[in-house]
Image (cartoon, helix red, strand yellow):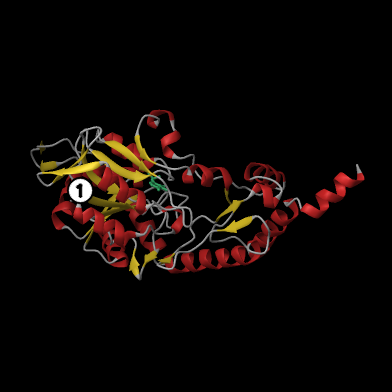
Amino acid sequence: MDEFEKRLAKYIGVKHAVATVNGTSALHVALLVAGVRPDDEVLVSNLSFIAPANAIRYVGAWPVFIDAEKDHWQMDVSKVRVFLEKHCRMYKKNLYDKVTAKRVKAIIPVHILGHPCDMDPLLELARKYNLVVIEDAAESLGAKYKDRMVGQLGDLACFSFNGNKILTTGGGGMIVTNNTRLADYARYLTTQAKDNPVEYIHNEIGYNYRLTNIQAAIGCAQLEKIEEFIAAKRQIAEKYSRAFLKIQGLTPMAEAPWAESTYWLYTILIDSKKFGIGSRRLMLKLGKQGIESRPLWTPLSRNRMYLKSRKMISGISDSLHADSLSIPSSADTAAGALQRVIETVWHCQKRKSLRGLLSFSY
Ligand SMILES: *Cc1c(COP(=O)(O)O)cnc(C)c1O
């Protein structure tokens, strides 16, 4: 396990890595070692897999959902800024939400779909307001932000090696950081907070969250191929994007000027008016041809347990959820299979002229 941690830390360019049973437990422990306490507030991306929001609740804190920006679908830093500047105030080096009077302690930017969030302005805000930044990099191992690896940008970062991620150990996760104190504390908490391993003395409530050595061995083998996996994903994305740019009503996944995306899960937006049918109809039609696709997540603030949460949203996550479709893009997808997806999508389009023709013939 030490070897996997060492190699991953080296790959990311950080001093420490602590392997965990999965990405969700990594987030849970990262929040604990970051000093997030019950009743604190933590800002988190609204368009994301649910794990980071739940991890915030595991420590008794409350999520503040931040909308996605429309171009790259990541946490909208301008909304973070408005929340911190307009809705919070500093008091004795801590930041408090003016409405709830709760302490605001941390930000979890989620780098979704292999693409990094715009980190520099976010880190600047975090420094200004004394907030801890925990990157949720579960979907974006190997992605770069301005030539810097995702995972080395915040105070802490979490990865997942779940079966659907770019590097998998069957199940697994990792906390990475440059801060020795935080790394030691994370290692302590993930191994049952054992203070005296002979007498079994524990001074804190710990967790059985460590990765097994068998999984770590798989991780080492997978890490050797990571550049191959990323190259394959980027090639798939390039093929898809080139084709979909030419189809009216489709918007291919974009890469920000400051980003090098791994295109972990290739996703398109469908403008139902221009394309002729919407994303859900397209999903059904693709399904009938044996092509699996699915929309991006329901915005987290729409889930029953988060309906009353604080949020900074203006409908972007909702429209991305409504219009998106992620399509097959695993690294081993054959060229022929890609071509088939492209052609099937093309055939699903309801062309204006054809529709006009049909209505005429009625
Ligand atoms: C997969 C994922 C996680 C959780 O990882 P697990 O290993 O499944 O617990 C956390 N955050 C995001 C954004 C993810 O996609």
Left/right placement of residue 136 relative to residue 189 reads right
Q: Residue at x 34, y 61 (%)?
A: 150
Residue 223 spot, x, y in % from top left: 38, 63
Q: Residue at x 56, y 61 (%)?
A: 332
Q: Taking the image as drawn, is residue 348 in sight?
A: yes
Residue 123 spot, x, y in % from top left: 26, 58
Quick check: is the Cβ at mark 1 less than 8 Å away from ligand 1? no
In the image, farthest residue toward the bottom = 147
The residue closer to the viewer here, 49 or 224, is: 49
Q: Amino acid at mark 1?
A: Ala
The residue closer to the viewer here, 320 or 133, is: 320
Left/right placement of residue 125 relative to residue 111 reads left
User: What residue is disc 1 on?
Assistant: 186
The residue closer to the viewer here, 153 or 158, is: 153
The residue closer to the viewer here, 272 or 214, is: 272
Left/right placement of residue 2 relative to residue 113 reads left
Residue 91 spot, x, y in % from top left: 12, 42
In the image, farthest residue toward the right = 361
Q: Residues within 10 Å of mark 1 (few under 14, many from 20)?
A: many
Q: Residue at x 22, y 50 (%)?
A: 132
Please tell me whether residue 338 is drawn above or below residue 31 in the rendered image. below
The N terminus, quarter of image: bottom left
Q: Taking the image as drawn, is residue 151 in sight?
A: no
Occupied quadrant, residue 222? bottom left
